Image (cartoon, rainbow, N blue to C red):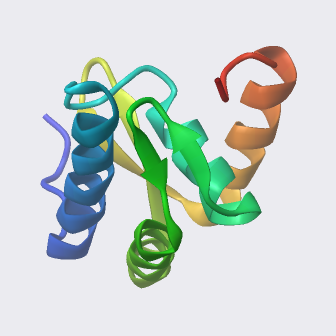
Amino acid sequence: MPPENTPDQWLLAYTMGNISELAYAASWMDNLEYVLWHALTEGPRRYGRHVINSDDIKALKMLSERCGAWMFFDDTDAETPIPLDLWQEKYAQHIKDNPHALR
């Protein structure tokens, strides 16, 4: 069993999940972590029924900086923190391999 997330990691995952709920009424849509990172780096964007707005982006940025990580959904371990430097590499590779992941 993986170690329990810190309070800041839990709050980041909770915030990400809430955006997924607003957009699709699903606790964690496929590619959610990639879509939210894209918004964090590129700015507001539509996502399902929701617009990821500047307040969402500000909260995600603040929490990810406090954690030094980004949350990734793993089928085995659920919401899993990944250090930001490793996440940026994972994000770039995923988008390269899956160009439609940001839809």
Q: Is residue 38 left or right of residue 26?
A: right
Q: Is residue 84 left or right of residue 73?
A: right
Q: Is residue 5 above or below residue 92?
A: below
Q: Residue at x 43, y 68 (%)?
A: 60
Q: Is residue 28 above or below residue 101?
A: below
* Image-quadrant location for residue 49: top left
Q: Quadrant of the N terminus?
A: top left
Name the foreground residue: 54 vs 90.
54
Where is residue 102? Give x, y as percent: 67, 29
Where is residue 99? Give x, y as percent: 81, 19
Q: Quadrant of the C terminus?
A: top right
Q: Residue at x 49, y 64 (%)?
A: 53
Q: Residue at x 36, y 24 (%)?
A: 29
* Image-quadrant location for residue 84: bottom right
Where is residue 12? Give x, y as percent: 30, 63
Where is residue 91? Give x, y as percent: 70, 40
The mark total stands at 0
Q: Is residue 19 left or right of residue 32?
A: left
Q: Residue at x 73, y 27 (%)?
A: 94
Name the foreground residue: 60 vs 8.
60
Q: Is residue 57 above or below residue 51?
A: below
Q: Is residue 3 above or below residue 61?
A: above
Q: Is residue 17 left or right of residue 38?
A: left
Can residue 87 be seen from the camera position used here? Answer: no
Can residue 54 be seen from the camera position used here? Answer: yes
